[in-house]
Every structure is written in C-alpha cells, then in structure tokens.
Amino acid sequence: MGKDRNEFRRLNLGDASFLNGAGLPRVLTLDGSGQVVQDNAGPFAKIDLDDVIVFPALVNSHDHLEFNHYPALGDPPYEDIDQWAHDVHDRYSSVVSRTEAIPVELRRLWGMLKNMAWGVTALMDHGEPHDSSSYELPVRTIQPFRFVHRADSCWAWLGARYKRGKGPLVFHIGEGSSDKVARRSARFLRLASANGPLIGVHGISLQADDARYLDALVWCPASNQFLFGRTADVASLKGETEILFGTDASISANGSIWDHLRIARADGGLSDVELLNSVTTTAIRVWGLTNFSDMVIAKRNHADPWKSLFQITPADICAVIAQNRLALMSEEFYDEIAPESWDDTYKAIKIGAAKQRVYCPASSLLSNLASLEDAPLTLQ
C-alpha cells in the first residue's frame, strides 16, 4: 500500500500465528509518532497482517554490552576462562587496544542496538550497573542486581557473602572444564547459598547437585562451544533450577541470538517450548519484569510456526514493539505501513544484510557510531 494521509495505523493480527502469546494483543493501534495507543479519535488506516508469527520480545539474560564491538577472539578450546583471557591479551593486544579506544558509550549503544535488531528488548548487562537512559532506546537493561564477576576465584564466596544491594546475586560460574573450576564453583554455591537469590551464568562444570542452590542458570551455548568445546548439561540441570538464555558478547561468540538458539536446539537439552520459554516467559518471571508486554512480529517462512520461529534471521523481523512503542521495523514493513510523519522519527540503518528503521532520538550517538572506522552499521 502507498502512504496514507491518516496518521493512525491499526495493525490486525487476528490471523497471525502466536507463540507464547496468550497475553499479547490481536490488534495494535499506533499514533502518528509510532506510540501504541488504546483509543484514537481520528481515522486510521487498517493493515491486516496474516502471514506472520508473533511472540513476546526476547530477554537476553547475559551480555557484556561494551564487548560487542570485538570479533570473536582466541584459538580454542581452552580449559578455563583464565587461559582464554591470558591468550587474548598476549596474542591480540593490538585488537584490544584499538577496540578499547572506542568510547564505551558507543560500544554499549552498539550492543543495545544489535540486541534490538534481533528482537531483544530486555537484557542483563553483566558488570557494574550503569545508567542506560541516555541512549533513549526502548530497550531495558535489567536492574537492580548484585554483581560478582566470577564464582570460581579463590575467595569469591566471601565477597558474595557481604555483597550489599537489591536484587539477585549474578555471577559467572563453572566457566571451563578443569577440575579447579568445578571444585571452586561447587564450593561457592555451598557457601553463598544463604545470600540468594542466586543466578549463575554458564555452568559448564556444574552437576545437578550444584544447580539446586541456584534460582536460575543462564545458558550460553554458542559462547561455551566456541571457547571450551562443550557447554552446560542443561538436560540434567533443568530438573534442579530454571534455565534462562544468553548470548555473551561477540568477543566470545559470533552470530545473532537466533544463531545461538539454533545451536541450543541442536544440543537437544531443552525442548522447543522450553527454549522459547528461556528467552521469554521464564526470563520475564525470574527477572521480575513487570508490565512487560513487548512483542515481535516476524515473517512466517514455514507452515509450522515453530519451524518458522527457529529459522528466523534478523532480516525476517518485521517489527519490534517495546515499552508501548514501535521500536524497530524492517525497511519493507516501514514502506508498507509508515505515514510520512514517521520519517523524522525513525532512522534508517543497515546491520549486515538487514535494512531496518529504528526509533532512536539520540541521533548524535547513532551518527557517531556509524562514523567509526569499521563501523558495525551504516545510516541509510
């Protein structure tokens, strides 16, 4: 359809296929700025969307935003994270220096943008909490939480015991295959168990008896497989704790969250339903994300909606609704539904093969990101 003079858009999703979508609306009305509204007084253009799948927006439960401007580094497999870190600093010091010279706010912005381009609208940025409001993106970073970087260092349990603040204690654990990592991780969980709730990340070396101390484990199979050649045994661990899903950063894992989900699916430790839950309903509940009605509309490329889901690439995402706003659209979707008033609100970007429109009022930061040498995106 061509441009319509009416500012309001009513998206009819009545014939779409919904996955985990019991609480998601079947009709969305958008005003002239792309905001979701409950009622509108003026006329609207009605758009029927039937050949699509709809599901809750994704929750990435483990990322390091400032490390997403790196390529995957290393010559794996490694026994533990120390061995990898030493190797990276020894062999890739020029890459580290060049990347660390990029302002950290631009590296974090890129991490947030790439997550939103995948359909992620809430994420756990693992590190000391920082204010993300200046980016003006409708993506929430999960807070509050208490942070311990690693549970398998010598005295991590003692630091965790006196860690003050609100929210769950979040930490890397069992990140490697060595006996030392396994022993220290098990000891940490026993000694820190009264300091809960506890949310561990990775858990490669964990046994089922260890996992019972955790309120949740964040599984990062793509990162684990790249660095260590193995990942957590979620088939046994899921009987003792909740399983969430994370990507880690690009420094340890190539590809989008959808590539990572396909790796997880091939592992077979979670069913399709459990895997989708790990990035949607389970994550929403575990992190206590209130008033979370974010959603993704994606192309349906297979008669079976579940097969279509696990074939998704970022180019297949039609629209992301976040915090009651149309946050991101494919260029094709934008051309089909956007009134002229949106032209000043949504910035045209290209990330890899995906051409998208993103709601990003902080255009100066976006321009600065796009102007970097070897910039990860272009402004169209």
Image (spheres, helix red, strand yellow):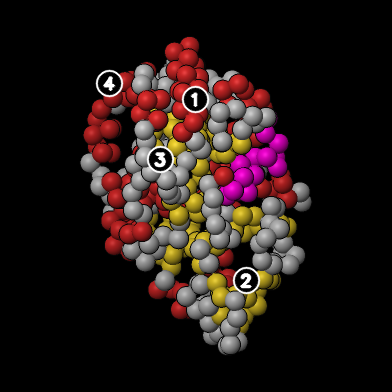
What residue is shown with label 3? 146
- Tag 4: amino acid: Asp
Q: On the rendered image, what quadrant is the N terminus found in?
A: bottom right
Which span of residues is magenta-colored? 268-285
Horizontal relation, residue 371 to residue 170: left or right:
left
**For marks 1 and 2 on the same chain, the one whose residue lies earlier in the sequence:** 2
Amino acid under disc 3: Arg
Q: In the structure shown, which secondary structural element does the residue marked by tag 2 occupy? A: strand
Closest to the camera, between mark 4 and mark 1, is 1
| Rendered image: mark on residue 189 | 1
Residue 30 at what x, y percent from top left? 56, 74
Can you tell which of label 2 and label 3 is closer to the viewer? Answer: 3
Q: Earlier in the sequence, mark 4 or mark 2?
A: 2
Q: In this rendering, which labeled residue sits more in front, label 4 or label 2?
A: 2
Location of mark 4 (residue): 90
Q: Nearer the viewer, mark 1 or mark 2?
A: 1
Q: Which badge, 3 or 1, is on the more N-terminal residue?
A: 3
Please name whichever residue, 344 or 227, is drawn nearer the observer in this view of the structure.
227
Residue corresponding to mark 2: 28
Residue 311 visible in this rendered orientation of the protein = no
**What is the C-alpha distance between the residues marked 3 and 1?**
15 Å
